[in-house]
């Protein structure tokens, strides 16, 4: 368990959101923001990841949370400080779900992208899987609806080995360090939604992913990720029509 605690630690509970004015200086902002307010073109956001458009009303709901994360990220132990904000945020999962919106498709709702911090809500369709991958920056995950099962992997002489497992339920928060490798499964017959926060520009960082069957390492490929989201949505539609 020590390895897990090193790799992934948990937290708890929360508070929520409501506010005014947008006083933050972001390198890039959600897609409805005017282009002149961003340093990075919004088209650059879509490195193959499935992006769900964020409506202004959604951002207003989540804005105070985003501001608190940005402020926490300036603290000495940024990941821990951001984790505290996230834990408060998902400690009332129904309020967070209301603020973000019920997931209806696999994808990412990006609330913030900057060089220092990325915040998005990731939604997994029923029983969706994501292959082992790394982030090359710290990551905090907080679940606000459903359940997300994580296998934590480690590199070994013979390749990648499963090292630990962590089941995250609604209200749970977990942390991954910059060297962590995990794969993700939604074991439920309904959607899972989680807030994912990264200590850097998630979309601009080259990463690795591992074939789920052979565990061969390859470069993180936006097209493959996009394909996973596309197939998950197609599978969901097929199941609905069956
Ligand atoms: Fe991940």
Image (tube, rainbow, N blue to C red):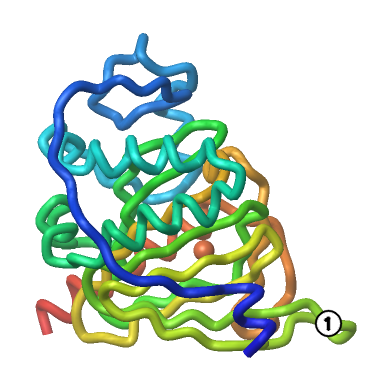
Find the residue positioned furthest to the front. 76
Using the image, determine if residue 34 lies above or below residue 201.
Answer: above
- In this rendering, position of residue 238 left or right of residue 47: left
User: Which residue is the site of mark 1?
Assistant: 156
**Looking at the image, is 1 positioned above or below residue 57?**
below
**Is residue 12 left or right of 118 when viewed as pictured?**
left
Q: In the image, what residue occupies the spot 66% across and 80% down?
A: 153
Neighbourhood count class around disc 1 (C-alpha, 10 Å): few under 14, some 14–19, many 20 upward: few
Q: From the top left corner, tell me how far across and down residue 77 is, in percent.
A: 59, 49
Q: Secondary structure at mark 1?
A: strand
Q: Residue at x 28, y 44 (%)?
A: 65
Report the side of 165 relative to 50 (left or right).
Answer: right
Q: How many numbered marks are there?
A: 1
Q: Looking at the image, is 179 positioned above or below residue 168?
A: above
Quadrant into which the N terminus falls: bottom right
Quarter-of-image position of residue 207: bottom right
Q: Quadrant of the C terminus?
A: bottom left
Q: Nearer the viewer, residue 127 or 232?
A: 127
| Residue 211 location (% of width, % of height) | 64, 75
Q: Is residue 6 in view?
A: yes
Residue located at (24% from left, 38% from top): 64
| 118, 228: nearer the viewer | 118
Q: What is the x, y in percent for residue 235?
A: 27, 74
The CB of the residue at mark 1 lies under 8 Å from ligand 1:
no
């Amino acid at each position: 368990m020590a390895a897990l605690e090193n790799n992934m630690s948990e937290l708890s509970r929360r508070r929520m959101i409501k506010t005014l004015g947008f006083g933050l200086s972001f390198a890039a902002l959600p897609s409805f923001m005017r282009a002149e307010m961003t340093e990075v073109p919004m088209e650059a956001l879509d490195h193959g990841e499935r992006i769900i458009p964020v409506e202004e009303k959604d951002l207003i709901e989540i804005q105070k949370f985003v501001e608190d994360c940005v402020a926490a990220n300036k603290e000495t132990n940024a990941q821990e400080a951001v984790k505290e904000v996230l834990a408060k945020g998902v400690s009332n999962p129904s309020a967070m779900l209301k603020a973000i919106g019920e997931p209806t498709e696999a994808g990412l709702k990006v609330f913030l992208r900057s060089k220092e911090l990325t915040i998005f809500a990731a939604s997994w369709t029923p029983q969706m899987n994501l292959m082992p991958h790394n982030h090359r920056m710290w990551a905090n995950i907080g679940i606000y609806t459903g359940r997300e099962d994580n296998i934590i992997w480690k590199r070994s002489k013979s390749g990648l080995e499963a090292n630990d497992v962590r089941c995250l339920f609604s209200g749970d928060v977990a942390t991954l360090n910059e060297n962590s490798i995990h794969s993700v499964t939604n074991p439920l017959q309904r959607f899972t939604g989680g807030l994912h926060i990264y200590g850097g520009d998630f979309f601009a960082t080259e990463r690795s992913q591992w074939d789920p069957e052979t565990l061969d390492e390859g470069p993180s490929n936006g097209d493959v990720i996009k394909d996973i989201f596309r197939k998950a949505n197609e599978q969901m539609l097929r199941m609905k029509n069956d």
